[in-house]
């Protein structure tokens, strides 16, 4: 028998009824069986790595020892009955040959009368019979039979938990593994079906993957085509392994995180920061700004995106210092320099894992991955402008699925003279997911987004393909928002929390239950509007809104107590910053009031009617 013929015979034996039905469908399988019963035959011509199959009805197929690659002379673009017939006919012929061979072996020996089924162990003088069941088992007991069947299934598919994961993932690129790892962050209802195949059903994805006894992801079955199907196989395997209590973090991170950067740039940046700390701000020349710019460019070229951002952040703080601006904060400057210096020192020593190096380096562009579904609750919107010349509006949502905050940002660069960004116009514009829904309305809705793309920071993409459905909005009082819902004391504790060197910088956001606004005052020295509120627990909390000409109307109305005097028992969605807590929106019942964007338009009274 040729080498490939033996491989194909092994493959055809693995093509059980369950396997073929899941790869094709039940109707196609039944039609194939019917045609075989009606007398269709197949002639095989064995090649080096394939077999040419000539069916008696005139159809010609070429098969390999996998269903991933096949050809057929019929016009079907998908797997057809002729391919199944070629496999099933070989199974029948092979089964017949085996039966004849067994019958010949079991014919009695003329001299001894002993068949080959029973063999005489001459060393011990006892008869040994093959196919002995598990010692001590009672196969007349249905429960015992089920237990034996379960043990057999576990034995056949043991490779799924015992094989080396790095070997199984060898054909996967780092970007594919990275996307699968991202999907694993989201909860998934997993169902396991065990028969001749082991099938893992992923409910929210609406797909299933069936694994064979062979330790190979390529042999697994999934109707999702091409790359998406390949990633589905890996995700199904990893979720199955997680159900069995396995932690694959180490094997996965080794493939996903590849830290490549310029060590020379790291060293130059650390030396420069050491010089800054030694010289001190008081004696620092303004030419130091040019050094920071040069190093920021070098960091960009050296694949150090977060180092570049940190250098530009220090540059912005220094500019405030040199201009003697009231917004300059010595504590903020010290935090920026300390964190960057420590990060540079860790990168230079190269004594941390690849994943930690990757966290310190960051990335230039966020990668967005498709999430099957997100159930979101609008928390309001905040308008902003950066010192580097960008304007935008960020919309905040609470995610019910993973109890995290999601954002969508509408951003434009305005550093050119002909570029403008009207907050009012963009706030009233229509969303990309639902043509008749404005962003103002979206900020206060409860929605379901399907097939939407998000990144590691849970930013939502406006890319095509996502479908948005508006749901009946729950009252904010009825929600349990997990760690997002906090009391005043926990927020104050959060405010003084130290930074995490290996964590990406993220906004610190919280929802606080407020009894009433106690006091409002505009502080001319700092150009801040200060709102003192009393929490539901009776604690006092200071909320601060910095002045800007864009928010002049809002500041004046809040300072005069417009609409806020009668506002009681509501929720404040706030951003926790160093030395200040800034309110973004107020929520009551089913209503949301985004302070910067709604109060200037005279909508303060809507909370009083909620």
Image (cartoon, rainbow, N blue to C red):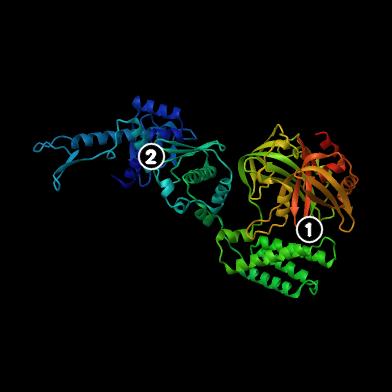
Q: Which residue is denoted by mark 1 in the rendering?
A: 388
Asked if one can make out residue 429 in the rendered structure from this viewpoint, the answer is no
Instruction: Count residues near mark 1 (Cα–Cα under 10 Å), then give few for <14, some for 14-19, many for 20+.
Output: few
Taking the image as shown, residue 239 lies to the left or right of residue 508, namely left
For the C terminus, the quadrant is top right
Work out whether residue 539 or residue 54 is closer to the camera in this orientation and state it. Answer: 539
Figure quadrant of residue 593: top right
Note whether 512 is above or below 319 in the view shown. above
For the N terminus, the quadrant is top left
| Residue 275 image point, x, y percent | 71, 74
Of tags 1 and 2, the one toward the viewer is 2
| Residue 132 image point, x, y percent | 25, 39
Q: Which residue is denoted by mark 2 in the rendering?
A: 153
Note whether 406 is above or below 283 in the view shown. above
Q: Which residue appears farthest toward the top when viewing the image?
A: 38
Taking the image as shown, residue 228 lies to the left or right of residue 412, namely left
Mark positioned earlier in the residue sequence (1 or 2): 2
Work out whether residue 371 or residue 417 is closer to the camera in this orientation and state it. Answer: 371
Q: Which residue appears farthest toward the front when viewing the image?
A: 538
Element on which disc 2 rests = helix
Taking the image as shown, residue 492 lies to the left or right of residue 503, namely right
Point 73% across, 47% down: residue: 409
Whether residues under marks 1 and 2 lie with C-beta atoms below 8 angstroms apart, the answer is no
Q: Which residue appears farthest toward the left when viewing the image?
A: 111
* Disc marking residue 557: none
| Residue 314 image point, x, y percent | 74, 64
| Residue 215 image point, x, y percent | 41, 47
Element on which disc 1 rests = loop
Asked if one can make out residue 511 in the rendered structure from this viewpoint, the answer is yes
């Amino acid at each position: 028998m040729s080498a490939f013929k033996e491989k194909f015979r092994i493959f055809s034996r693995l093509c059980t009824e369950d396997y073929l039905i899941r790869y094709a469908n039940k109707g196609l399988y039944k039609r194939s069986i019917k045609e075989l019963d009606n007398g269709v035959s197949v002639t095989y011509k064995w090649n080096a790595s394939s077999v040419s199959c000539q069916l008696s009805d005139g159809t010609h197929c070429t098969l390999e020892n996998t269903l991933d690659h096949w050809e057929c002379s019929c016009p079907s673009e998908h797997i057809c009955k002729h391919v199944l017939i070629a496999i099933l006919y070989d199974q029948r012929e092979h089964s017949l040959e085996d039966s004849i061979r067994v019958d010949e072996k079991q014919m009695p020996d003329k001299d001894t009368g002993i068949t080959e089924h029973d063999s005489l162990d001459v060393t011990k003088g006892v008869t040994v019979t093959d196919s002995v069941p598990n010692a001590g088992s009672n196969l007349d007991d249905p429960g015992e039979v089920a237990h034996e069947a379960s043990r057999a299934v576990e034995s056949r598919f043991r490779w799924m938990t015992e094989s080396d994961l790095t070997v199984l993932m060898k054909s996967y690129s780092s970007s594919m593994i990275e996307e699968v790892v991202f999907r694993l962050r989201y909860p998934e209802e997993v169902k396991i079906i065990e028969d001749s195949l082991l099938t893992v059903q992923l409910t929210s994805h609406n797909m299933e993957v069936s694994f064979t006894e062979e330790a190979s992801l390529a042999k697994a079955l999934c109707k999702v085509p091409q790359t998406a199907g390949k990633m589905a196989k890996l995700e199904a395997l990893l979720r199955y392994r997680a159900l069995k209590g396995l932690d694959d973090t180490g094997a996965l991170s080794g493939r996903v995180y590849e830290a490549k950067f310029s060590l020379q740039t790291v060293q130059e940046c650390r030396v420069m920061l050491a010089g800054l700390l030694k010289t001190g701000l008081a004696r620092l020349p303004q030419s130091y700004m040019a050094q920071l710019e040069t190093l920021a460019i070098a960091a960009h070229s050296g694949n150090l995106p977060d180092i570049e951002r940190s250098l530009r952040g220090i540059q912005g703080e220094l500019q405030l210092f040199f201009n003697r601006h009231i917004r300059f904060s010595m504590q903020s400057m010290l935090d920026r320099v300390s964190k960057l210096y420590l990060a540079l020192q860790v990168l230079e020593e190269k004594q941390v894992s690849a994943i930690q190096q990757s966290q310190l380096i960051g990335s230039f562009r966020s990668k967005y991955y498709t999430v099957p579904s997100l159930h979101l609750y609008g928390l309001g919107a905040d308008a902003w402008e950066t010192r580097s010349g960008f304007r935008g509006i960020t919309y905040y949502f609470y995610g019910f699925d993973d109890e995290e905050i999601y954002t969508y940002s509408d951003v434009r660069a305005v550093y050119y003279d002909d570029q403008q960004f009207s907050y009012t116009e963009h706030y009233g514009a229509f969303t990309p997911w639902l043509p008749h829904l404005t962003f103002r309305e979206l900020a206060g809705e409860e929605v379901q987004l399907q097939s939407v793309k998000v990144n590691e920071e849970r930013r939502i993409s406006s890319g095509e393909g996502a479908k948005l459905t508006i749901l009946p909005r729950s009252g904010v009082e009825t929600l349990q928002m997990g760690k997002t819902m906090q009391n005043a004391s926990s927020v104050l504790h959060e405010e003084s929390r130290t930074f995490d060197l290996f964590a990406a910088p993220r906004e610190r956001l919280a929802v606080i239950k407020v009894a009433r606004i106690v006091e409002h005052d505009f502080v001319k020295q700092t150009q801040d509007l200060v709102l003192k509120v009393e929490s539901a627990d009776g604690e006092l909390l200071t909320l601060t809104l910095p002045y800007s000409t864009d928010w002049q109307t809002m500041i004046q109305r809040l300072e005069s107590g417009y609409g806020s005097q009668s506002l009681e028992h509501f929720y404040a969605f706030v951003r926790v910053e160093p030395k200040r807590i800034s309110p973004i929106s107020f929520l009551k019942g089913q209503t949301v009031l985004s302070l910067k964007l709604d109060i200037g338009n005279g909508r303060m009274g809507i909370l009083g009617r909620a």
